[in-house]
Image: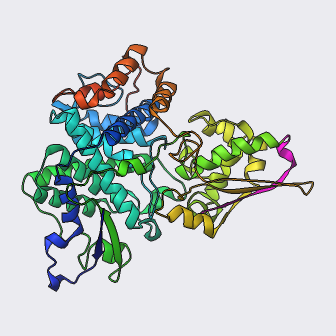
Amino acid sequence: MKLHEVKVYPSKTQLKREDQLAWKIAGVAADKVGVTKEVTEMIINRIIDNASVAIASVNRSAPTSARGGALGHPRKGGALVFGLPARVKVSPEWAAWANGTAVRELDYHDTFLAADYSHPGDNIPPILAVAQSMEKSGRDLIRGIATGYEIQIDLVKAICLHKHKIDHIAHLAPAQAAGVGTLLGLKQEVIYQAVQQAVHVSFTTRQSRKGEISSWKAFAPAHAGKLAVEAVDRAMRGEGAPSPIYEGEDSVIAWMLDGPDAVYHVPLPEPGEAKRAILDSYTKEHSAEYQSQALIDLAFRMRESIDDFEKIEKIVIHTSHHTHYVIGTGANDPQKMDPKASRETLDHSIMYIFAVALQDGFWHHETSYAPKRAQRPDTVRLWHKIETVEDPEWTERYHTLDLSRKAFGGRVEIFFKDGSKLEDELAVANAHPLGAKPFEREDYIRKFKMLTDDLITPRESNRFLEAVQNLPRLKAGELDALNVAMPNGSVDESKPGIF
């Protein structure tokens, strides 16, 4: 890996494109280096993971709306839509929209956290949609996904968006565009223009994850994917983009990030160096914000020492800056303490999550968020006794790039009315690569079956799992096998819209 200095230049400098971050990203995407077996196996895991959560969410409101829009754009020889039969094909950017929304809806797929946040599995829907539409092979798809993960994770390691209230899809869209470029074997010049276009149109604010969090949280990465596919299409047709998109005096760094004096150092693979960033990411065992994963596991452990939750006086969670200010009491969002809040808000409230996990000893993607569950009086009493505090040590461990020390958990103090105290801590979730039980292939398959067994036939489940695990050997035009179809009549129709 090589660190690339990125900063703002005045227009009169006329920065050479070879010195621009977007050109360097495009160079990584255009590099025809092979994908290692370890990375290939993890890509298969994450395709299984995405299919799991997409099918589980397919009839929820946001995925249903997204699918309705996609069905308004049918295309012979196009891409497939999760839940629908293979005969139904739509334009790839709309498949990216529908499938990306279904993947993101439950907040239940993979994550990478460093200088900023990311769900790098969001790269898969648009790259897969284009691969199906352009009749690419399994190996082509693997190369494209490896690039998408690499670029997004490298940007997340170096450039913080959230402190400027910019949503994390600003690092996702250029990664998706780069991944599509790799998939299609495009030249560096074309990918360069696509990456710049994707950056330019994808900078949005974090209000989507603040206050009354709406379904846009699920739509946002899918929208990035749609924008990325469109950006690549325009670049392939010879269109250019605002340039330099990162370093220009009126561009994103100068006005939306650290400003004209900013200096970032972005790691990227050297020419000929394998793209391995996906191995730095981690999936979720529980359907909740990633920063709650270790704390859910910790709640399960601590509850074994509690005989009566009504004896609790208060609970203090000592954790990182991110956890405290994004999903903790440091966010100053009264909605995070509201029993009538939306699911999207509750899965960004560590106070609610910890209370329910402590009481129940399990976590379920639907029942743990049900209005009846959230409004239970004893849960509300316990929930409102919980507060978070930023701890500098946990903040440092959250940000470190030393993956052996990186942590997303916290230390919990439970104070009882009789003056006694229970204290415990957990650095990483059990399913994390450094956790008590890291996720392996059988865990991804178990998660897939747990989430889909009541929704698809055993035959369809077995067919998909066999096909995806045979990914490197799927020939050009065979990627339709990666779609998962539900029985006829079991997919909800969308409410009417324009399309």
In the rendered image, residue 412, in percent from the top left (x then y), is placed at 72, 55
Residue 492, placed above or below residue 216: above
Viewport quadrant of the C terminus: top left
Is residue 88 visible in this depiction of the protein?
Answer: yes
In the rendered image, residue 383, in percent from the top left (x then y), is placed at 73, 50
In the rendered image, residue 156, in percent from the top left (x then y), is placed at 39, 61
Residue 185, placed above or below residue 413: above
Which residue: 40% across, 47% down?
279
Q: Residue furthest left?
A: 238
Which residue: 25% across, 35% down?
72
Q: Which residues are magenta?
A: 307-320
Residue 494, placed above or below residue 387: above
Viewport quadrant of the N terminus: bottom left
Is residue 97 visible in this depiction of the protein?
Answer: no
- Report the number of discs: 0
Query: Could you tell whether 347 is left or right of 385 in the image?
Result: left
Front-most of residues 380 and 176: 176
Q: Residue furthest right?
A: 418
Q: Quadrant of residue 131?
A: top left
Query: Could you tell whether 205 is left or right of 190 in the image?
Result: right
Which residue: 47% across, 57% down?
113
